[in-house]
Image (cartoon, rainbow, N blue to C red):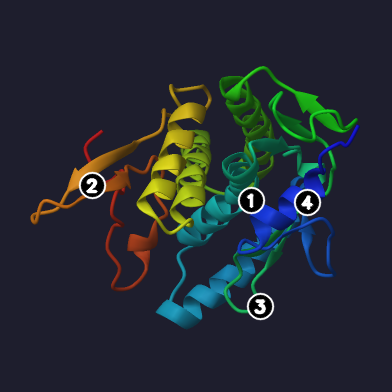
Amino acid sequence: MEIGDGLASSLVRAGVRYQLRTDVPDGWLRCSDLLKEPALFDEWRSLLTSWLTRQHGSAPAQTAASYVMSWYLYVPAYVGALLLHHERRVPSLKPEQLAFGLGPDRPHPEGMAVLSDAFYCLPTDPGSARREATVVRDERALAAVLRAQFIGHAARFVRAYAPGTRLGRRMLWAAATDALDSALWRAGRQGGTAEAEGAGVADAALVLDARYRPLTSASTLRTASTAEGHRSWERRRESCCFSYLLPGEAECDGCPRTCRR
């Protein structure tokens, strides 16, 4: 019997445009190393502070802490969202199984690595008979796996990151909610068509159909109309990036400081 391909092939298909890989190049960071050694977050914030200062003339500590918070959480969220959207598979999102590389100038995650062959999939998946596959009954169950895997990773991040910043735990979990919701949306938007974006919105509604504590909300994606009558998708943020503290900057669209709940 011919058995379908494994997760490495899924990463190639989903990562042609999104820089997914299966190895850890020199200089990349394994998520588990950051969580075990929170001083590495200090180094990351220092790199970001220098970049923000070059770009804006100053770098408030709260802004740098918020950027690093959001960028880190986006790694497990984005990996999970891409594989769900493109392959209907969910890889391991444990910190030991994920790594990322920072950009050479702007210190944000520019590439991501999945270091385990294990994945969850649907009964119809061609690779469902592989020994590293765990089959779940339907898409709702697959969404629950993604949600649980992400929450488990985020919980470890919150414990490691909170003591070194002035960001409260509610803010950290709000950022986790934003990361997952926006990653699912982005996975669809990057398809370049309204249909692909709609599929990403549907994935967000599937994974975040309700509030799952300690996440702070269900998906906040909703339609909006312009003055010309065009309709588009938008989302209300749960967390603040504190970009408005930078010189000359204002609150972002969808900022919780300015938007009604």
Task: Tell me the residue that label 2 is attached to.
Answer: 258
User: As displayed, is residue 164 above or below residue 249?
Assistant: above
Query: Residue 217's quadrant in the figure?
Result: top left
Q: Amino acid type of disc 3?
A: Pro
Structural distance between the alpha carbons of marks 3 and 2: 34 Å
Task: Tell me the residue that label 3 is attached to.
Answer: 104
Helix, strand or loop at label 4? It is helix
Tag of residue 9 = 4
Total marks shown come to 4
Circle 1: is it few (<14), some (14-19), or many (20+) Cα within 10 Å? many
Structural distance between the alpha carbons of marks 1 and 4: 19 Å
Q: Amino acid type of disc 1?
A: Val
Instruction: Estimate the x, y position of residue 192 in percent, counting from the top left.
Output: 43, 59
Helix, strand or loop at label 2? It is loop
Structural distance between the alpha carbons of marks 1 and 3: 17 Å
Task: Tell me the residue that label 1 is attached to.
Answer: 75
Of callouts 3 and 4, which one flags the residue occurring earlier in the amino acid sequence?
4
Q: Amino acid type of disc 2?
A: Thr
Q: Are marks 1 and 3 in contact (CB under 8 Å)?
A: no
Structural distance between the alpha carbons of marks 2 and 1: 27 Å
Q: Visible in this render: residue 37?
A: no
Q: Amino acid type of disc 4?
A: Ser
Instruction: Estimate the x, y position of residue 91 in percent, counting from the top left.
Output: 73, 39
Of callouts 1 and 3, which one flags the residue occurring earlier in the amino acid sequence?
1
Which residue is found at the position 44% from the left and 53% from the top?
A: 189
Of callouts 2 and 4, which one flags the residue occurring earlier in the amino acid sequence?
4
User: As displayed, is residue 120 above or below residue 40?
Assistant: above
